Amino acid sequence: MSSDSLTYVKARCLCKANEFVIPFKTASLPQATDLCHCSSCRHITGQLAVHTAEAASAPLAIVEGDANATPTAPADLSKLSKYNASPALTRYFCNTCGAYLLYESRDDNDNPRWSISTGALERTEGIVKVGYHAFVKDTKDGGLSKHYRTLNGTEIPRYALEYGNDTVGADWKDESLQAIQKKYQDRIHAHCHCRNISLYLSRPDQEECKDEAKWWLVPGADDAQYEKGHKPPRFIAGHCFCTSCRLSTGSTVQSWVIVPRAHVFDYHSPDPEVPVTLSKSSPTRVKHLTQYSATPHTYREFCSTCGATVFWWTKSKEKVHLPQDESSEEAVVIDLSAGLMDEEQGGALAEDWVSWYDQIMYEAEAVDKEGAGAVKEGSKLAAAAAA
């Protein structure tokens, strides 16, 4: 829907508690906006990077019953939680399903400026695309920019900090990264921005990783330079473009690290040496998590305070590719949102702990087809370089 000066696009979260219309200045389309890799954006959302589009005004209410009517009434934002990492920016996420939707800042005249998470939009084609990478330096290892290198055959600029600052190459790594990786060989931290969710992962055993049935584990290649005679074994990770992940996060790409629950621990637990529990009936369930289920026996977990996506897990027997323990209410394997990985202990991609899959998941469901194709191509290049 559009008028002479404005183009309107619907946006929503997964649970549909929040549905509204976003007005865009038609003359500004398509927007080419930054994919932000700053540490705040990653740990606040749980995503490897955050992409938004600038709205012409605050969200508007959907006009029911008339598809051609021009929306004018302000949208109801009462079902959104607010999080302020700084006074300059207010972030809004759904308090039911956890989707990050809106960003509100102020211009020099104290007028509100609104942005929308691109993954919440009904369509992105002709509306917004990734124009450049920003704050890549925060990642220590390039982060998602290593897997999102080009768009339609054109290299995407990678700025160390803000737009216009120095750029970094596609394979840039911070000079401190190698020393950091050596320091955190046995356990690595993962946390949300407010740190109410503060976890650590333990390293899988090499022999355990050699079990081909455990496809989510990757054994370390033989290498005499390492004390144990092989490179560190790792967890597998990948990028998902499915509709459910997109609408429950507001991100066009959701990146997951697939981890046995037995290797995930809660720093805040009375006994931090006992693996996390996520079942609502568990007395030791990780605190400060909000659980949402859109399909039976499958759950998404996000931080109740800052809104960061934390876990996806399932007890559904239909997920035959995942192991199930029928004697327990807990999952054997869980997905951890990759943006939580502590870049100060191994880089945003945590490549010393994580092996990134060279394929993407649910490409056919991607709302941003060009972006999905770019990540697909970049993931293959990155995996080949890491081999």
Image (tube, rainbow, N blue to C red):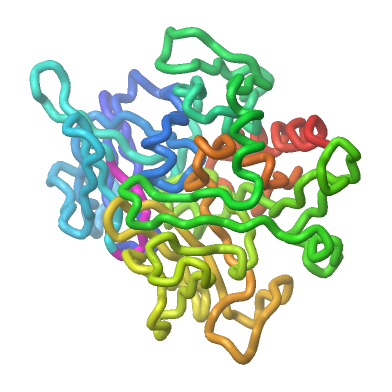
Q: Quadrant of the N terminus?
A: top left
Q: How many marks?
A: 0
- Residue 98 vs 351, above or below: the answer is below
Task: Find residue 123 and report its image quarter.
Answer: top left
- Residue 163 vs 290, above or below: the answer is above
- Left or right relative to 2: residue 344: right
Task: Find residue 283 and report its image quarter.
Answer: bottom left
- Residue 345 vs 275, above or below: the answer is above
Q: Is residue 101 magenta?
A: yes
Q: Farthest residue in the front direction?
A: 227
Q: Is residue 366 visible?
A: yes
Which residue range is magenta in the image? 96-102
- Left or right relative to 76: residue 148: right
- Foreground of the two, 25 or 321: 321
- Residue 99 vs 170, above or below: the answer is below
> How far across and how far down the image is residue 237, in percent?
66, 50
Residue at the location (47% across, 29% down)?
A: 35
> How far across and how far down the image is residue 119, in percent?
44, 45
Residue at the location (25% across, 39% down)?
A: 85
> How far across and how far down the image is residue 376, in percent?
70, 38
Q: Quadrant of the C terminus?
A: top right
Residue at the location (62% across, 23% down)?
A: 173
